[in-house]
Amino acid sequence: MKNTYTKEFAPVELNNPVLIEGLPGLGLVGKIAIRHLIKQLKAKKFAYLYSPHFPYFVLVNKKGNVRLLRGAFYYVKDLAAKHDVILFTGDSQSQTIEGQYDIAEKMLTFAKKHNVDTIVTIGGYRMESTDKPKVIAAGTTQQILEQATNAGATVSTTGSPIVGTAGLILGLARFKQITALCLLGETRGYLPDPLSARSVIEVLKNMFNLNVDMAALDDEITKADKMVTRLQKIEETRALQAVETRKEEDKKTTYIS
Amino acid sequence: MKNTYTKEFAPVELNNPVLIEGLPGLGLVGKIAIRHLIKQLKAKKFAYLYSPHFPYFVLVNKKGNVRLLRGAFYYVKDLAAKHDVILFTGDSQSQTIEGQYDIAEKMLTFAKKHNVDTIVTIGGYRMESTDKPKVIAAGTTQQILEQATNAGATVSTTGSPIVGTAGLILGLARFKQITALCLLGETRGYLPDPLSARSVIEVLKNMFNLNVDMAALDDEITKADKMVTRLQKIEETRALQAVETRKEEDKKTTYIS
Amino acid sequence: MKNTYTKEFAPVELNNPVLIEGLPGLGLVGKIAIRHLIKQLKAKKFAYLYSPHFPYFVLVNKKGNVRLLRGAFYYVKDLAAKHDVILFTGDSQSQTIEGQYDIAEKMLTFAKKHNVDTIVTIGGYRMESTDKPKVIAAGTTQQILEQATNAGATVSTTGSPIVGTAGLILGLARFKQITALCLLGETRGYLPDPLSARSVIEVLKNMFNLNVDMAALDDEITKADKMVTRLQKIEETRALQAVETRKEEDKKTTYIS
Amino acid sequence: MKNTYTKEFAPVELNNPVLIEGLPGLGLVGKIAIRHLIKQLKAKKFAYLYSPHFPYFVLVNKKGNVRLLRGAFYYVKDLAAKHDVILFTGDSQSQTIEGQYDIAEKMLTFAKKHNVDTIVTIGGYRMESTDKPKVIAAGTTQQILEQATNAGATVSTTGSPIVGTAGLILGLARFKQITALCLLGETRGYLPDPLSARSVIEVLKNMFNLNVDMAALDDEITKADKMVTRLQKIEETRALQAVETRKEEDKKTTYIS
């Protein structure tokens, strides 16, 4: 395999589809959001994206079956919405600079082929937020940014760059006459963050009239909260022990002298 | 040289061959296993694989002769088995991500050309095992996995990724309609591990009715055991000396104060 | 996007143009100089350069609009000069070796297409200078070097290499029969250095009869000076505190003993 | 520039030429040897090799003139020898793995075009030798190895790999039906080592009846010796001072306690 390519294994006719992308990144916000949308909208897989720029290992499932790292495209039809929807997520981002540009470009070629006129990419935005993570929006047109803010997002005013596929798709979209929007959920980023993904999904629900149940995601959020609390306790204990150890060592030093 | 390529220097007609691959990796399990099979089955070299993704040095033999890093294909015919066998090993894995994908692909193209319908790749699996290393199997079909477990392997249920050529061959095999199996021998991984290679060969013997004598490998295992014991002693001595040195230094510190 | 390419969006007929290039580098000397020239000469943007060798992120402006990293070409016509002028700057240099050569080559192809016969590249030269930074010149012909020294530059006699696009353009220019000059402003390099950029612009003014007002740049210089003074104070305070902390610790050590 | 290429600027007809290569490497042995041969044999430059795999900077000479990094081919005709000679050296080795293979391949294509049937590459071999550095030989045929040993070289029996262009040319030479030999001068490697280069040149003189005066090289050797002695003194002084400083600190510690 010398080139990134997409492979469709089910013929699909889509009506005016929106493509929503979420690869692994900060807080796994994009991947968690897409995975939840796939489940709740009962989306069907119809294509893969393979690339020699992904890491060079394969995954093994619990039955011992092996597969390449890849991205996967899913579709949802007959929604009570104006748009059919294509959902995209995957195992990894590209490991090389040139691969990042190449994969973003191949996704746009795929989108164009399916008459996608709007792409939304999802990512995380590093922020020590407390209660409800905000959703930061950046886009290729003022119109799509207005739709996003009307749906609950906040326009990015910081000028922070957007790293990786979620960003490059926007950068390259204008060359294909595709409108693109990036939604970044605030997240601390070092642990999977379903709460941040929830904020992003709410914006998407409003924008595209998606009928998505949040219950399952709320369970994940509760679990993630418990995990964070547990890790914080471990960290506090560790810090206290470090202080104790130091005191002990100070005593010893005094004694030896 | 800009591309990976294979070069056959002896015309060979093979009957329904199985290809077994083992490149250097954890514990050198794959390379040791293939080297032993080549010797025991009196396999004959018939092709090389060259790549600009191998490290940029050449090897010198004891006569001062030089050669490129490469992979080599060997064949065995007229076995008391249903399959002829192609064996593959080499000096190194690819040094770049794209090279890893490229080399795995070129091996599959070679396999297809020789009507290989089953490939087995061999590697190591990091594990602090004690007595008899287990052999972990992952595969592209349930049937090949069953054959492997019937022959003594254990199906991987951990979901650990398989890194490098041994993994990518499996990932890419389905695009060529080739069945592929990966056998990973448990190994600590930091020293050549013929005991782990032995476990893998036993599974292969059972699967493909190979007539392989283990005596030579048992000698290697004894040597490797002695090496491990020696290294452990060196390490223990070093640790004891470190303790002594510290005591001496503590005394000095007391004296100075 | 697999290749570096330039894209013109406004048809322009230029008279015997000089191309002046300044990408981010040491002290941002090149970028600051070009930015100032663009503003003062009211240059108009007419083309972009895109490359998969730029870093893989996109920029977001204050309205939330997104764009790829890129280089941009501007032109100035009807100067009271013998030459029209093309100005080039951008967001970043290439992140890979091959990309560096590729981008320099693409810039020369662009220059050739527009009948450019002289290119000037701008960069920084690391030097702990005090008052007025000197401008070091290197070039592809003795004639252009003489013009540069007549305009106030000093010919490089140290044999220091010139790193990055500013250097490679010169190295590759002879294959396109284009004369090229590199002007390096002395700079400490670790902060944006408009004073160094000023020195370079003065040489350019003399060489090409450019009518450039320096007032705005002088404001930037004043600001940069204040920034340096502030940073030095912070550093001094930090150093003093470190000394104090050490004294305190020494006292403690004495006490414990 | 996307590809490595060679460019001839003087038409040359050579009689059965030998190509001798020496790029920068351990102790600069290869580069020093070739530079000396070029001067002593009054060889004439006739071609360059350029590559986007060289580092991305350009060199400036004392007149301020700029040039790309490159390799250069020189020729010597009408020697009292059976062979004309092509000499090759350059500024740098490739910075990427693939570039290393690419450049070695391009050199062989160039050699083939000029009917070269023997290539000798020169490098350094790390060794704490004392008096006269030995020359280690590795080759593609037993015949060339015998010629080398008859001329004073020692055949490599250690199986050490040969890294970089000097090695890869040998590895790739057999695909072009060119005989190749590598001569490695023993060197500590961390400083330019003309003494090691001298040993290599002596082997070459014997092998190809080259009429090379060594006087100039002996001057370089004397200078290099002085440099080594000076560096050793600096190092000894530094070590003594470190001991003194430690004693002083020990006293202080005692006092404080």
Image (spheres, coloured by chain):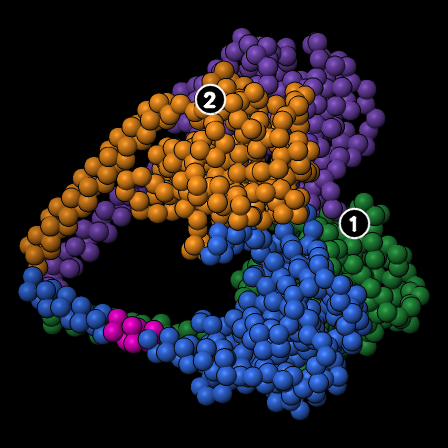
Chain colours: A purple, B green, C orange, D blue
Dominant secondary structure, magenta: helix
Residue name at image x 29 percent, y 28 percent: C222
Residue type at mark 1: give it. Ala
**Mark 2 on the same chain as mark 1:** no
Other-residue count near label 2 (Cα within 10 Å), few / some / many at <14 / 14–19 / ≥20: few
Inspect the magenta stretch and tell me whether residue D219 lies in it.
no
- The magenta region covers D231-239
- The answer to whether residue B43 shows anywhere in this view is yes
Inspect the magenta stretch and tell me whether residue D237 lies in it.
yes
Residue name at image x 14 percent, y 66 percent: D249
Residue type at mark 2: give it. Lys
Subunit bearing disc 1? B
The image position of residue B9, as x and y in percent, is: 86, 69
Q: Secondary structure at mark 2?
A: helix
In this rendered view, identify the residue nearer to me: B150 or C111: C111
Residue with the mark numbered 1 = B173
Identify whether D12 is placed above or below A197: below
Residue name at image x 88 percent, y 66 percent: B84
Tag shown at residue C39: 2
The image position of residue D227, as x and y in percent, is: 37, 75
Q: Quadrant of residue B34?
A: bottom right
